[in-house]
Image (cartoon, coloured by chain):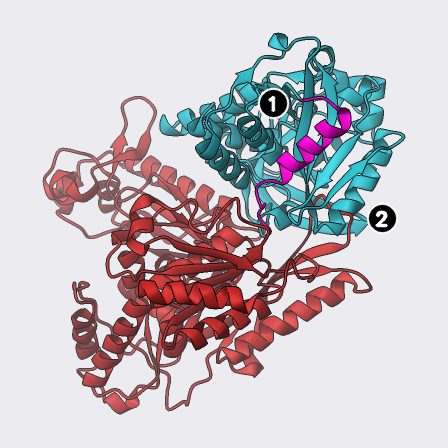
Chain colours: A red, B cyan
Amino acid sequence: MHGRRVVAEAKTPTTPDVTSGIVTAIGQVMSRHQAGEVDAVMIGTTHFTNAVVEARHLMATAVVRLGLPATQELPPMVDWPERLRIALGHHVYICHGGHEFDGRHISELDPAELIRVAEEIGRKGIRSIAISSVFSPINGEFEEEAGSVLSAALPGVAISLSSQIGRLGLLERENATVLNACLRDLADHTVQAFQGAIGSAGINAPLYLSQNDGTLMAVEQARRYPVATFASGPTNSMRGAAFLTGLLDCAVIDIGGTTSDVGTLQHGFPRPASVAVEMAEVRTNFRMPDVYSFGIGGGSVVRSDGALAVGPESVGYELPTRALCFGGQTLTATDVAVAAGLADVGNPALVRHLDRELVRRCLNLIQARVAQAVDRMRTSAAPIPVVVVGGGSILLGDRLPGASVLVRPEQFAVANAIGAAIAQVGGEVDQVFTLGGLSRDTAVDSAKATAVDRAVTAGADPATVQVVDVEDVPLSYLPGNAVRVRVKAVGDLRLEAKHLATGG
Amino acid sequence: MGESDVDDIAVGAAVLGTGGGGSPYLGKLLAQQAIRKHGPVKVVDASEVDDSALVICCAMMGAPTVVAEKLPRGDELIKAFTTLERYLGRTATHTVSIEAGGMNSTTPLGVATQLNIPLVDADAMGRAFPELQMVTPTLYGIRASPMVLADEKGNTVLISAVDNYWTERLARSITVDMGATASIALYALSGVQVKETLVRGTIGLAQELGRVLRDTRAAHGDPVTAIVDRLQGRLLFAGKVVDVARRTEAGFAKGSARVEGFDADTGAFLELQFQNEYLVAVREGDVVVSVPDLIITLDLDSGRPITTDEIRYGFRVAVVGAPCDSRWRTTAGLELVGPRYFGYDIDYTPLESLGMGTAGGGT
């Protein structure tokens, strides 16, 4: 990409070794360009997610939690599936340390205790350690100290800190940290292979990986925190589709063969769903984009005996044999679109006999269902722009009630890669503030400043950093003196700009 | 009652939690951990409890956000419980939940299995409430204290107060000092008092609600309707949250959520007022349900209960009203937990007598 423009695109199947697919794709996009023109390469990968789902290439991992005497009733990995627990070895230690909600220490860190733990970890030959501490998003000092003690005692050991992964909720944050720790070897190898693939194409430019929330992380960070790439797929697809149209606030509809998914973007980011994401049955604090699905797609079966109905029954992947326009016996939504002249698919002669009134009513019904879905997702009464992608997008004409415009980006087949290539980095804060003399506004302002700092540290151009999400919730069941503040800031990636271009 | 029963209770208890009562997930994990260690729990109906029995309530007190970070040590609750027993000079024959809504529905399971005493299928609210005195035994003049609080550091505090308001006040500030969470044992009841004063069958009800939600989802049915039917409640509104405002007023965290209607409710707005729980729902200036009746906010598609902590802009919700225990509707009951106690200047009208929101929106 160059600025907003897609210069070249390629799509090729994922390969078992991960990198040869990337080499192929880079080879194709670079066939008519000079390697020296590339300023940065962004990769969105499901490699780490797959490794966890398949329980392959995972390291034996030790978990050190700081919080004694609290937290013993629910030890680390308490709710993990047996399969993963075995893969990681279940080496769990609870030590002293941890903070109270107001910053007091639960107990003091005990270096001698940590040395004893280090000795045992060393004896077991474990080379990766996840460290969590109660309320570490408020104060990460104990995790950092424990990390220093453990790495001094075990040179070369990989340390993952839960405060780097963020967000309140000890078990969920700790789970994500443990998943991260068991991926460290794989992250080293994979990142090295990615760099090799880029290097072999003659490209000498920094590499970034896309994270769960759609922002980027530099390759060094990705080596240490690979778990942040989890669940980045859906986010990248939605952001990519919108980016192709230049829209920051819009709805994105992906109409497939059987169902359609609607999501919305605000400031270019999908709104997160309410439910915590489970990765291979491990509960984490990552969030997926909020998406509403409903049963209409290109393969939806049309029934006109009795009340007119389109879907949820669908011919699905058998569309090319079962739909009327392909010589089949089943009246589908695609046939209706072809009959109305909205699409040039199959043989139009085979659907010419369809009743015009039926066709019109079908299309109205489809349009109404889609409009209703968009209506459920949008958060203001004003009409919003709607971006339509997916094979079933032929079902919609060029207008939709409640949509200010209907846009169909051309390169949506590579929307996911384009989403990965949107060069933005972010910073996040999730803290509890005890409002002694502090006003709520001061607390929120302080959190905003920290989030902006973190975005800049992550590589954002300070001039472009914006706070995109603020949430402050007073702690329930407490006299009103404590508030949880969550802030996210995002800015454009600072590049040694020759010109902005990417692979994906 | 075994590990798998707890799954359903936790979900059902979140429904009865009316937006408060903490994380059902943690409550479930803690109860399952205890059952795994000490074995299943015997559950008895209130009618099976001997008149001379000693039944002690136990619960967790404090901020759910903090509980999710500073997890329990494991022996706090037993410590609170046995300290109270020692003070009373008697051994408890049973334990019971103070609050069927939220994580306290399953909190006593840990005590029951460790001390090997039965759990009574009942609670003292029939839902969730934010303060210790807001229980049906208070209506019968029963004292919350002597009460014991315990923390993970080994501290225990015994409170003996002049009335239940003082018990609440003293216990709340000790809880903050203990790090915003404490394990508590209180309301020592006789068998006679259990039968007379508690809301019966509510743990079984929570389990049933959990099962109804699970079965309805498996059958691709409408979970919201299933909940409404089981509680003999009403679907008051279906729509999406278009605004959430939170503020602190005289030391209380108050909030409101504005819901814009779908389907049959298109064009209308519902205003949900909440503190720790959902307390009042107003449609176009008319109150359609208020505390102490239950106001339950569910995810429109999955039926998952949505708490006041997590409700956000963009959520698609069904707002359901369900009748409270009839004792809350008496003059004394309303003085304790009516809308005015929570600072809303409205008279309580039972859900059944209020004008319906609408025919209700579908999903």
Task: Name the residue located 51 percent from the left edge and 32 percent from the top edge.
Answer: B11
Other residues around mark 1 within 10 Å, as few (<14) / some (14–19) / many (≥20): many
Q: Secondary structure at mark 1?
A: strand
Q: Is A134 within the magenta?
A: no
Question: Residue B263, percent across and down?
Answer: 53, 34
- The quarter in which the C terminus of chain A is drawn is bottom left
Q: Is residue A396 visible?
A: yes
Q: Which residues are magenta?
A: B70-91
| Outermost residue to the right | B162
| Left or right: A232, with B82 as reference point | left
Disc 2 marks which amino acid? Ala
Q: Which residue is mark 2?
A: B250
In the image, is residue B210 above or below residue A227?
above
Other residues around mark 2 within 10 Å, as few (<14) / some (14–19) / many (≥20): few
Pointer 1 or 2: first along the chain? 1
Q: Which residue is mark 1?
A: B234
- The quarter in which the N terminus of chain A is drawn is bottom left
